[in-house]
Image (cartoon, helix red, strand yellow):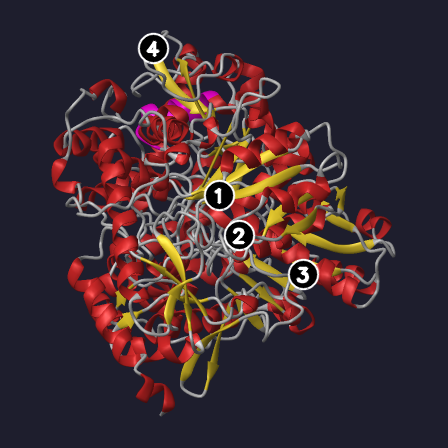
Amino acid sequence: MAFIPHTADDVAGMLDVIGAESIDDLFDEIPRDLRAAALDVPQAMGEMEVGRLLTERAASDGRPLNFIGAGAYEHHIPAPVWAITTRGEFYSAYTPYQAEASQGTLQLIYEYQSMICALTGMEVSNASLYDGASALAEACLMAVRANRAANSRRILLPRTVNPTYAQVAKSIAGNQGIVFETVDFDRSAGRTLLESLQPYTGQDVTALVVQQPNFFGNLEEADQLTDWAHQNKILMIAVVNPISLALLSAPGQWGSRIGGNPGADIVCGEGQPLGVPLAAGGPYFGFMATRMQYVRQMPGRIVGRTVDAEGRPGFSLTLQAREQHIRRSKATSNICTNQGLLVTAATLYMSLLGSEGLSRVAAASLQRTADLVARLSGIAGVKPAFTAPRFHEAVLLLDRPVAPVLAALTRRGIFGGLDLTDRYPELNHALLVCATETKLDADINAYAVALTDIMKPSRAAA
Amino acid sequence: MAELQAREPLIFELSKPGRRAGTQFPPRVKGSAEIPAHLRRAAPPLLPEVSELQVVRHFTRLSQMNFSIDTHFYPLGSCTMKYNPKACNSFAMLPEFLGRHPLGPEPQGFLACMYELQEMLQEITGMQSVSLTPMAGAQGEFAGVAMIRAFHRSRNDLGRTEIIVPQAAHGTNPATAAMCGCTVKEIPCDANGDIDIDALQAAVSPATAGIMLTNPSTLGVFERKITEVARIVHEAGGLLYYDGANLNAILGKVRPGDMGFDVIHMNLHKTFSTPHGGGGPGSGAVGVGARLRPFLPIPLVGKDGARFRWLTERDVPQSIGRLSGFMGNAGVNLRAYIYMRLLGREGMVRVAEFAALNANYLLKRLQAAGFEAAYPTRRASHEFIITLKRENRLYQVTAMDVAKRLLDYGFHAPTTYFPLLVPECLLIEPTETEAKEDLDRFCEAMIAIRREMEQEPEKLTSAPHTMPVRRLDDVRAAKQLDLAWKPAA
């Protein structure tokens, strides 16, 4: 019997203590007419058979050469990361409510919070949220609580923010009366223009969201945008890629000092690049950091360092008065879990890489993408879409529909990027590509050779 | 007695300038790409500088400061800390699964697993359709209530904004209702733990959007009047939401769809044994009856002939939308799928049977040892409640003291002070994967603690004594906030 340790003698002895004739008697409070018939699900399989099934299914998905980014990035994951993360003491532990028996998890989260603060240049971080998209939704709800100067619940959401994040923010925050206003981008540079924000100058607006690097991989003029927001008493929500922060200005440093309010107010993003595998989309984790003045408006768990009854240092969940199990319907969010296991992986990853390793990963990704764009742009019918400086992603414009080209690449074992036709039809045949440090010269060459062949005029005609 | 690693310095305290784990650095790439000066970072982030062995040792030691299912009995009520089979993790971590980008062409092998998972969950719950995208129980709840609201809106029935919840409900229920823009109406339970039908009858109105219920309830007992509850709410025009956080007690015994529920969320990290991971990732799949099907969160997994594909906005135009960047906690869903294939049809029913056997056995033994059940006339479901109000009066010890003392005996504490309406309570859930000997050892510890309570209660009130730390100063933690390490000035 799968995972059930009871012998027939155990069962007999236990029923005797209970005073029941059979196990079935234990269900005698369920009305007869509600009792289920036998379930129509497959029969049990042993571990060997399940292993065979899963191995075959995995093999059928193959191991293509991947140039897609768009919010999930393929980086090298050091061997210790998952070797330690899957230790049973981390893997099979519960939320650290019993602090004395969970100091390992609690200290790890404290170290994680410290590293997120260091990367983002912010004062406090929570213990993580579900993923980057839902973290933005929570950041928008938090901004409404934090910005007492605004009553409008209006949030400015540039089109350079990941369109899926925008959808998720609307699904989650829309029920609470938050209105998202779209801000257009500069078609030639591929970034948000200060001028497109001018209609909102002096208006009652809660927050401005800026994604850096933006969805196209381009770098926004974060300082200008932050200053504009603060001049208009608008909170700045930064959505950032944690790897990029090894090279890019930390959100806590964005803008100049206006009204004693430097930097972004809420920083969030997708933590997946920090040691979490692509894994068909999850589990990942969202991170969130803010300034101390807003800590009580932040959702999610937070770990604090304190002392025990003997004055020794120790860690516990703190500021729980914000949370659902205390505040119920008045809580900052209904969030109950964080993404503990992924935070464990990310903390190991950041420890192994350190700031030097992270900047090496970021610099290599920057260069590989530059190399990829240079190679592919040399192919007739392919050109870069935008002029703004980039990090590790770029939009290319093709002279023909993207989907058939990607399908042809897939047949050659290459995932050539993300077709932006549905998301940005006006860009006309736009393809978002990404190369991280995992892509070597030979990989970029393989992509270029395949694309050259697919884009040959004779093939287009055929 | 429990033996855990004592103290471990912060990783920052192990750091030394210039030390590194160089094997993990990528090769330098030749080229001239760089970030424009005004966008460049001014000073590097203060991350630790440590060797690979230091990292491995530090985090291994931290792990050894934890209780976990792999090391300790964990009778944490409402959390279902059952064995997490190693196979579920091993097969979910096959390199092809891990390497798959979520926006690539639809992976047929992976999607076959997800499609079958949807079908199995539909069958188990008696629902018509399932969406796997919610990333945790609370998000599943959110999806459920958002669908109820979308349903009423689609009928132009705009006044239905009240959600009824029993007082014993989990805190996420009212918090979720508020997140969906609803107001909350709480109704009491009677002395035997069933819903107060008169109070329900008085609470429903044309403003009722729905009711959120768990069955078995958070009181650890089966809601016997469920059919009547369903009738009253449906007649009032509301829908029934089943908080199926935990199906361990009913798997194969009774199906929420057959009880009259319109929508359910399931915590796959409980019933279907995906890891708790020190607080996530969870997965909160939702199932619905026919009326709510058009509103399911996307993406879903569909099948065209022999080919599996994502169903998106185009296929489900009335969907409440997307809740995650891609498709929820895909790898958690995969672990649940593997677990269900290992259990199969026979194994699933046995989960409920042996979860109930273990819970009822432990209840009877603890009662025999002098502990008071909160609902003595009722069967335990997969869990049950002990109240220590008498011990509190006689010996001035609390449920918290007993919980902390149990840690010294090598057992994780049961859930304490939940549900809130039972004074000094311990909510105990042994799960089906514990052997009788382990339940007996737990009883012996409780008997020993009972003796200490009478003879030397300070052993309890000052517990734990053998953990890496003693009780922590939570007031100080909240007042003198220390939330991130900073280098000494």
- Residue where numbered disc 1 is placed: A220
Q: How crowded is mark 1: few (under 14 residues within 10 Å), some or many (20 or more)?
A: many
Disc number lying in front (2 or 1): 1
Task: Give the left or right position of residue A443, taking residue B396 as reference.
Answer: left
The chain containing the residue under callout 3 comes to B
Q: How many neighbours does mark 4 have within 10 angstroms: few (below 14), some (14-19), or many (20 or more)?
A: few
Q: Are marks 1 and 3 on the same chain?
A: no
- Across and down, in percent, residue B314 comes to 59, 74
Looking at the rendered image, the disc whose residue lies closer to the viewer, 4 or 3, is 3
Asked which quadrant contains residue A257, the reply is top right
Against B2, residue B338 (above or below) is: below
Query: Could one spot residue B244 in this view of the protein?
Result: no
Q: Which of marks 4 and 1 is nearer the N terminus?
A: 1
Numbered label attached to residue A190: none
The stretch of residues the image draws in magenta is: B401-411
Which label was assigned to residue A312? 4
Q: Is residue B39 magenta?
A: no
Where is residue B184 drawn, in percent x and y? 75, 43
Q: How crowded is mark 2: few (under 14 residues within 10 Å), some or many (20 or more)?
A: many
Judged from the image, the secondary structure of the residue bearing numbered disc 3 is: helix
Q: Are marks 2 and 1 in contact (CB under 8 Å)?
A: yes
| Residue pointed to by mark 2 | A160
Q: Where's residue A443, x and y in %?
A: 20, 63
The residue depicted at 72 percent of the width and 53 percent of the height is: B211
Q: Residue furthest bottom?
A: A462
Q: Is mark 1 on a helix, strand or loop?
A: loop
Location of mark 3 (residue): B147
Q: Marks 1 and 3: which is nearer the front?
A: 1
